[in-house]
Image (cartoon, helix red, strand yellow):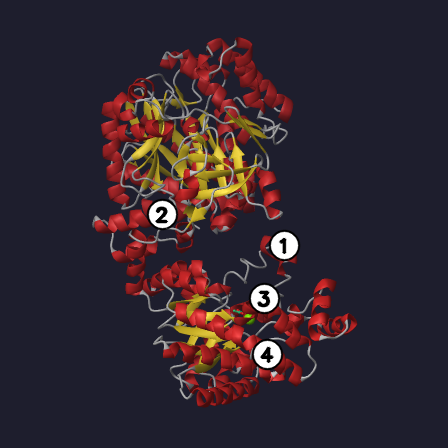
Amino acid sequence: MSHKRVYTFGNGQAEGRADMKNLLGGKGANLAEMNLIGIPVPPGFTITTEVCSEYYTLGKEKVIELLKTEVEKAIARIEGLMSAKFGDVANPLLVSVRSGARASMPGMMDTILNLGLNDDVVEGLAKKTGNQRFAWDSYRRFIQMYGDVVMGVKHTGKDEIDPFEAIIEEIKAAKGVALDNELDVDDLKKMVARFKEAVKRQTGSDFPNSSYEQLWGAICAVFDSWMNERAILYRKMEGIPAEWGTAVTVQAMVFGNMGDTSATGVCFSRDAGNGEDLFNGEYLINAQGEDVVAGIRTPQQITKIGSQRWAQLAGIPEDVRRQNYPSMEEAMPEIYKELDAIQTKLEDHYRDMQDMEFTVQEGKLWFLQTRNGKRTGAAMVKIAMDLLRQGVIDEKTVLSRIDPNKLDELLHPVFDKKALAKTKVLAKGLPASPGAATGQIVFLAEDAAGWYNDGKKVVLVRIETSPEDLAGMAVAEGILTARGGMTSHAAVVARGMGKCCVSGAGELKIDYKKKTLQVGSTTLHEGDFISLNGTTGEVYEGKVATSAAELSGDFSDLMKLADKYTKLQVRTNADTPHDAEVARAFGAVGIGLCRTEHMFFEGDKIKAMREMILSETQEGRKKALAKILPYQLADFKGIFRAMHDLPVTVRLLDPPLHEFVPHDLKGQEEMANAMGVSVEYIHERVEALSEQNPMLGHRGCRLGNTYPEITEMQTRAILGAALELKKEGIHVFPEIMVPLIGILYEFLEQEKVIRETAEQLFKEMNDRIDYSVGTMIEVPRAALTADRIASSAEFFSFGTNDLTQMTFGYSRDDIASFLPIYLEKKILKVDPFQVLDQKGVGQLIQMATEKGRAIRPNLKCGICGEHGGEPSSVKFCHRVGLNYVSCSPFRVPIARIAAAQAAIEE
Ligand code: PEP
Ligand code: MG
């Protein structure tokens, strides 16, 4: 640990730099960097993330003691640069206190503005600025924030508004005004007094007067906020380790609320929603930063073009727009020019889209923050490809900037145009985060979670969202708010989640108590269906059908780029021609796993299958299998046709037989009739087939070894289908895979049946075809004896679902009963069924691959468990030299990018 705990910045100098994010957090490091490149930033200092760890090990008192001298010195430095004094009545310095972790966590932790005010200082501030209203408004905001964040003054029920807001509403109502800015100095003074009473009432403590007491309270509250519920949840979602901690930045306040030449805003160097190379953002005249983000007042656009587009969407005529909602470009042209120049400079400097916060204090522009902007999946792809074309970044940088999981957003359907044309537009809001969402209305985040758990698709409808709504937002199909702009909490968080969001739909009247949503004469209730188009901002009544996503253009260029660097191939797990086609369109170069059992559940197939299972003699089974054969043949033809010219690995029957038998009386009666036996007989057979532990029971190759006629029939179907297609001129490369091998002889027995059946079939059809016979490695013993198995098996496919199950001894089906506790206690960092356990299961994979190739040097090895589409697992597969990963169709592009990244990272 370094001993320096505080890093100062200001006046073109800084002790930190952009590459010190780990120590100073993203915000602190970038504030330092902005100083160094000549951007106007109010002076301040950053307390390191290491201190956050000290805070949690040594405790509050000790940390304050350790920081005291350095913080006081740093404050003195700000005082010097700002020519003001912290806590001074005549010439007060006010500061902001903000959190800032390595990775940005928007709105998750706490911020306090205007710190340093008390009953005396507020008078001094009023005198110094000659602006009583500003001083008292700043003071009431400070008490509000500090009371909430540091002293814990909260609302009492989920559908109640917070006590400070309640006081504001009461004062406005008593005066008969609607807007905050219609309140005068006396009203604000009254508000301050009532706020303090509320603090005392709820907490039993007086609001602190001493500026240093306030400062230490705020610093500690920021450290505390690292462990608040929403920050923990956000970290879990984004995979951010708790050990990182947050830094705390203390900075001289600049004020956007000092009158009409002051303003505050948030801007992006490119469009975070669709990636368009267009500077954009929102600002509010005479306001403080929180007003923009909190969505309390709907802000105006920064650029003229943005403002015109916004007006068009809202149906506002151009003259009205110019008069009532002018852009910053029109209202403050000089400041706008400076802002535009700085945003360009920052994007050039960081070579990526920037998300920036600024304040204008009486005509002077200050930057408060810059960071690489969060963006949707579509924007991620477009921005990276545009920057490549513009010569700003190279191909490898493009690939390394892609978050593979975010591609998912691009692959899902959008609203079907025809269906949309027939649908009634209920309201219009801002296109805050693109995509299409249809679901049932819920108004409270906790209801969203509950309904979701009941298997329902919901749209979360709120007046505005706050970080407390995070869990509900995470499970909703989409989010709709009545208030707030493109940078409101709802919009920023939804974009981060890749979730469809329409914000600021002002026509909506939402009543949380009655659970209704009213637009004009239409009233919708909780549970009614609603649809959102996050790309246009339109809200529709009812359900709307969707259609497939657009995969050409930048997306396909990006994929071509990935292929240029990738060594690992990406196949798909597909059991139907449709899935095979989808995966092929996504770039799969073969099927790595076709699970044949899924084919048996359709139509009459299940009856023949049941007959086979329920028969007690080989003769009876063969009779039933003869009925199944034509179905299987047709199924394989469909899949092979869809995958022409590419390899297809077909796995022989794998699951325990009792999964197929009828457990209900009706089904048993049906089978009794079909087979001409009694219901009692069927019932007894079903009982006899049931197992204590089916996952470790009569399944996998144990089925084929006990009932070789199943393997025989499947071999006939696979190779017969391939031969029939051969006649049509379609090339098929079948790979027959034996599941759940643990012992070489299990494989040898099956291989014998397959090869003998094949020869028989080739003779009958008077034709032959190349095929290979390999095995899944999903039992630890198979991995341990992989050299022996490779003496016969022509390929290995690691079934990491079962391999994880048997390596850990955790049942795939029952892990949910203890996994949450294991994660909470950090016994496990992640769910090993989702993210490959590289140390244990991975070691088996690596060892088996090496042992296998020692015997058979060009043994083809792949993975077909769920991990085949998970980026960190895909990278592992590349490192241990597998030939391919196989994953579900929608994860194919994700795996392709991860594979390219693995090759680049080599
Ligand atoms: C596996 O076990 O990883 C596998 C792919 O097979 P299944 O999930 O069908 O058991
Ligand atoms: Mg398996």
Question: Mark 2–mark 1 contact, CB under 8 Å?
Answer: no
Q: Earlier in the sequence, mark 4 or mark 2?
A: 2
Where 414 falls versus 882 (above or below)?
above
Task: Please tell me the numbered disc located at residue 601.
Answer: 3
For marks 3 and 4 on the same chain, the one whose residue lies earlier in the sequence: 3
Q: Nearer the viewer, residue 880 or 576?
A: 576
Q: Secondary structure at mark 1?
A: helix
Q: Amino acid at mark 3?
A: Phe
**What residue type is disc 4 on?**
Leu
In 3D space, how far apart are the residues under numbered discs 3 and 2 (Cα atoms)?
Answer: 38 Å
Point out the tag, 1 or 3, that comes first from the N-terminus: 3
- Percent across and percent down for residue 472 are 55, 41
Instruction: Give the numbered dot on residue 625.
Output: 4
Mark 1 highlights which residue?
821
Identify which amino acid the numbered label 1 is placed on.
Ile
Disc 1/disc 3 C-alpha distance (Å)? 36 Å
Q: Which residue is mark 2?
A: 378
Marks 3 and 2 close (CB-CB < 8 Å): no
Callout 2 amino acid? Ala
Q: CA distance from mark 2 to mark 1?
A: 36 Å
How much space separates mark 3 and mark 4, taking CA atoms? 15 Å
Q: Is residue 750 left or right of residue 329?
A: right
Secondary structure of the residue carrying numbered label 3: helix
Image x and y of residue 837, in percent: 51, 65
3 or 2: tag closer to the N-terminus: 2
